Image (spheres, helix red, strand yellow):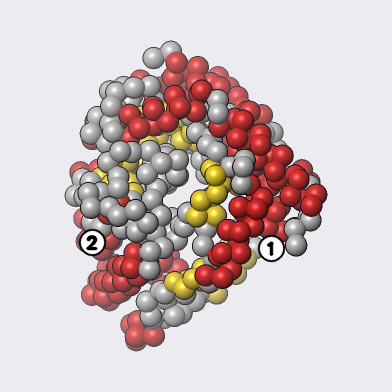
Amino acid sequence: MVNPRDREVVRRLAAQVAEVAAHPAQEDRRRRWYAHNALQPGRPMIFCSPEGAWSEILPASVLECQDAQMRSWEYGLRMRLYAWEHFADDQVVDAVFSVGAVTRTTGWGLEPIDVHSGVSRGAYTWEAPVKTEADLDRLSYPVTTVDREATQRLLDLAHDTFDGILEVRQHNGFWWTLGLIGEWARLRGLQQIMLDMIERPAFTHKAMAFLMQGRLSWLQALEDQGLLSLNNGNHYVGSGGFGFTTELPAPGFAEGHVRTRDMWGFAEAQEISGVSPAMHEEFVLRYQLPLLERFGLNCYGCCEPLDRKFEMLKKVPRLRRVSVSPWCNRAEAAEQLGAGYIYSWKPNPADIAAVTFQPDRVRAYIRETLSIARGCVLEIVLKDTHTCNNEPARFDQWTRIAREEVDRL
């Protein structure tokens, strides 16, 4: 039984979200995201995602609810309201409350042993379980199972809490990336996968083929069970940006049964930033392509610099959004991507995390990028901001500067 006070708290916040969702600015933002994702000319889109710094912006002390589930919902609602009130970006606030299915997904049969630093949000290393080629035979494909009763209880609670204020929807999400190489690094070891590409190429190919087949089987099982959800609206896709598009779902879509071809897909390869384009293609991309082939539109890349690899990445089917990380040559990205792909620029988050925030430096940096990427379909995604040095107003300043510079165009 939910504490009546907890229910009152989240309903009050939900009513505030609904009020914000009715603001005329939301429809304008939606329209611009649809045009942006269709590669139509327009002002660059801006999105601020504080990520790890949310704990400094909204510390746990601000929460009023006692129940763990209600505290989680309270936090999500507060985040939506804070972003609207503080960030001069293009996030859309809608009157929807999403609830995911209660599921359990197995791993690959062998699990790495994490060794943490002991510092909150600190670094860690891990003991990789695949020591020899024989260990590949001990791996198994991932399997997802659903607790239907627990899922229904959660949906019932959401309806009881939010009906009449927000529209409750079930929206499932099972992955962030289908990059594969990150999973192999966890199983084999980050340094070891680099050595294996040279010393044990056949073994690496065998391992990557196994992971690819495992994920293909897993995706098909999710589709067959009706567990997939559309991400063609106000949904975070790739490593930044939102999914608003009229190009999805694909022809033949039947309401209530989402296929991978009706969705945005995403892969990246951050763990092999240092390898050549040829090795990237041979050991990673060739195994990602069958996965990405299943999706209606695709995103590629996150923090890795892709400036030597853009030509290779054009082999990705229906590629639409490409990450331009802080370590990427921005001019090369502009030349290679042009107006044919979304130039998803990730500014360096060090400006937010630094000891001293420097507005003039931020302005010059953004202005320079806007000049470099002129003619591109540009989005500015401030993310990987794991601290703001306990000065949340930095996000307000950063996004306000970005808005001023974009509006100068």
> What's the mark number on residue 118?
1
- SS category of the residue bearing label 1: loop
* Residue 193, visible in the rendered structure: no
The residue under the point 63% across, 47% down is 162
The residue under the point 35% across, 81% down is 136
Query: Mark 2 — residue?
Result: 290
As drawn, 323 above or below 270: above
As drawn, 77 above or below 156: above
- SS category of the residue bearing label 2: helix
Where is residue 55 drawn, in percent x and y?
68, 46
Point out the tag, 1 or 2, that comes first from the N-terminus. 1
Q: Amino acid at mark 2?
A: Pro
Where is residue 102 drawn, in percent x and y?
54, 66
Mark 1 crowd level (few <14, some 14–19, many ≥20, 10 Å Cα): few
**Front residue (pair 171, 325):** 171
Quadrant of the snapshot with the N terminus: bottom right
* Residue 29, visible in the rendered structure: yes
Distance from disc 1 to disc 2, alpha carbons, whole Å, reads 40 Å
Snapshot quadrant of residue 376: top left
> What's the mark number on residue 87?
none
As drawn, 40 above or below 292: above
